[in-house]
Image: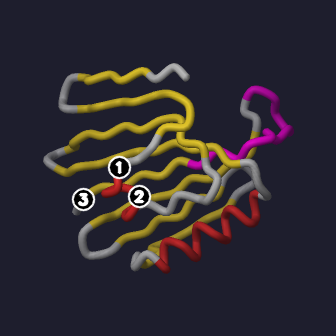
Amino acid sequence: NLTINMNLPGGVNSIIGRNLKLSDKYTRLLPIYPGSRIFSVIEGKDQGKDNITVSIRIRDDIDKIIKWHRQEVERMGYSIKDWSTTDEVTNIWFYNDQYTGSITISNKDHSNPGKTTEEVRVSLWLETK
């Protein structure tokens, strides 16, 4: 497995690879679907706020994945601020007293319009308030 770890200007740390692992801190804060493969983790600061973006891939039914994420953010103690679904993507925005975050879920093949991919792509973003 090849893993690339980059420390970028502004305190941004980016890790790209296959089957990456999250620290315990983030596994308690982010809803990571069972069986997910993490392939990108970007940690940084924006205007003094810590943030993380995690990109994962999942081989499962997209409707099941969407339902699980909606239920899991609430089980983890977050409130859902808003959610939307289009033909291309589902977005879920959530928060609690310490964090705000979003989940983007898609199985569209952007290089081949009208087609779907075998794996569902999920991007999770979390920021301190």
* Residue 74, x across and y down, in percent: 48, 78
Q: Nearer the viewer, residue 123 or 37?
A: 37
Residue type marked 1:
Ser
How many C-alpha atoms fall within 10 Å of the one at disc 3: few (<14), some, or many (≥20)?
Answer: some
Residue on which the image places disc 1 = 23
Residue on which the image places disc 2 = 27
Mark 3 vs mark 2: which is more N-terminal?
Answer: 2
Instruction: Name the image quarter holding the C terminus.
Output: bottom left
Asked whether the residues under the numbered discs 1 and 2 touch, taking CB atoms below 8 Å apart as contact, a structural biologist would say yes
How many C-alpha atoms fall within 10 Å of the one at disc 1: few (<14), some, or many (≥20)?
Answer: few
The relative height of residue 123 versus residue 80 in the rendered view (above or below) is above
Q: CA distance from mark 3 to mark 2?
A: 15 Å
User: Which residue appears farthest toward the left when viewing the image?
Assistant: 48
Q: Residue 113 lies in magenta, yes or no?
A: yes
Q: Could you tell whether 71 is left or right of 8 in the image?
A: right
Residue type marked 2:
Thr
Residue span colored magenta:
111-122
Tag of residue 128: 3
Asked whether the residues under the numbered discs 3 and 1 touch, taking CB atoms below 8 Å apart as contact, a structural biologist would say no
Q: Nearer the viewer, mark 3 or mark 2?
A: 2
Instruction: Name the image quarter holding the N terminus.
Output: top right
Mark 3 vs mark 1: which is more N-terminal?
Answer: 1
Q: Residue at x 36, y 55 (%)?
A: 26
* Residue 20, x across and y down, in percent: 48, 38
Q: Could you tell whether 118 is left or right of 76 in the image?
A: right
